[in-house]
Image (cartoon, grey):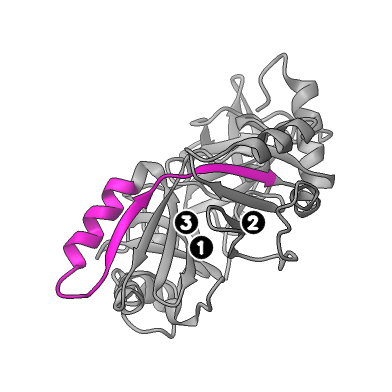
Amino acid sequence: MIPPGNERDDDAAFAACREDWTLAPGKGRAWLKVAGPDAEEFLQRLLTSDILALEIGAGQWSALLDRKGRWVADLLAFRCGESSFGLDHPAIRSTALLEALDRSHFAENLAWELEEWERTLILGPKGGDALAEIGLNPPPSSGGCSIVRLDDDRWLIQRPDKGAPCLELFSPGNGPENFLAELRGRASAPAGKPVLETLRVAAFLPRFGREFSAETILPETGDWRRTSMTKGCYVGQEVVARIRTYGQAPWRICSLQFSGHPPEKGAPLLDEAGNEVGKVTSSCLPPGKKNALGMGRIRRKAAEDGNRILAVLGGQSIPVAAKPLSRD
């Protein structure tokens, strides 16, 4: 929800993300470089996605799970060079990610390192034009997930997980900031955390720490685009494949559409008999809209088509349209 007093600025920033371009700080994510002759094979047997399918400069949705199919970290995996990869992940999961890699590393010839960058999000369909105007000349947008080296010091990634067209500029923290200052000076309505959260929720993009956690199995999120069903074994593959083929997870992450304003995070979700069957995990009221959107974690049977779900808002129960998320 947009906090009181900031509505006008946030509305302008939200519009810029959809129609023009604006900036936002790239906070909350971290970057792990994995490189060496055996890096490809090592990541292929650990991650859920097909690393062998990545060409240089390409990226893909991915994940690292434990042996029970639970999330260690959600990832965007990029091939930066022939034997060099970048794993974009939630900063709060860096320690868990490093520990998992260390447990799985035996005699492979590779190394990994958390790299610190100054990260700047350029949101909106005209973000590439904004970079070109200050002389950075990005390649044409592919509309997917990619990485390119702009010069000796800077990388640019195209990321699909922000709810709007998004480029992210990686620059050294101790480098010259003239180009960043110029870019900031051109941005008319910088986007803050409320705008980023509204974009995410409106696009129904689950986030670690909100919709799912280290206690959640991947099938609950329905995020199948992070998995390959043909690559063979990876950590947690047996659990994921068994549920994908033969069964269903006991809980589901669902998109929610409310009548009116959004309930707060943690608001109970009820079935028609008044039994609690889940909770709201995120919600927002996009600018210009009358009805709120959100996401929630709901028991599978309650989330089936045709079941009536209610949310508690201000002591009253309001109807909710709930649909389990599923992305291939």
Is 201 positioned to the left or the right of 32 in the image? Answer: right
Q: Residue at x 60, y 64 (%)?
A: 145
Identify residue for label 2. Answer: 306
Identify residue for label 1. Answer: 223
Q: Amino acid at mark 2?
A: Gly
Q: Amino acid at mark 3?
A: Arg
**Element assignment for label 1:** loop
The magenta region covers 94-122
Tell me the crowding category of disc 3: few under 14, some 14 to 19, or many 20 or more residues within 10 angstroms, Cα based: some
Check if mark 1's residue and mark 2's residue have beta carbons within 8 Å: no
Q: How many marks?
A: 3
Q: Is residue 102 magenta?
A: yes
Whole-percent x, y for residue 133 in the image: 80, 48
Identify residue for label 3. Answer: 300
Tell me the crowding category of disc 1: few under 14, some 14 to 19, or many 20 or more residues within 10 angstroms, Cα based: some
Give the image quarter of residue 230: bottom left
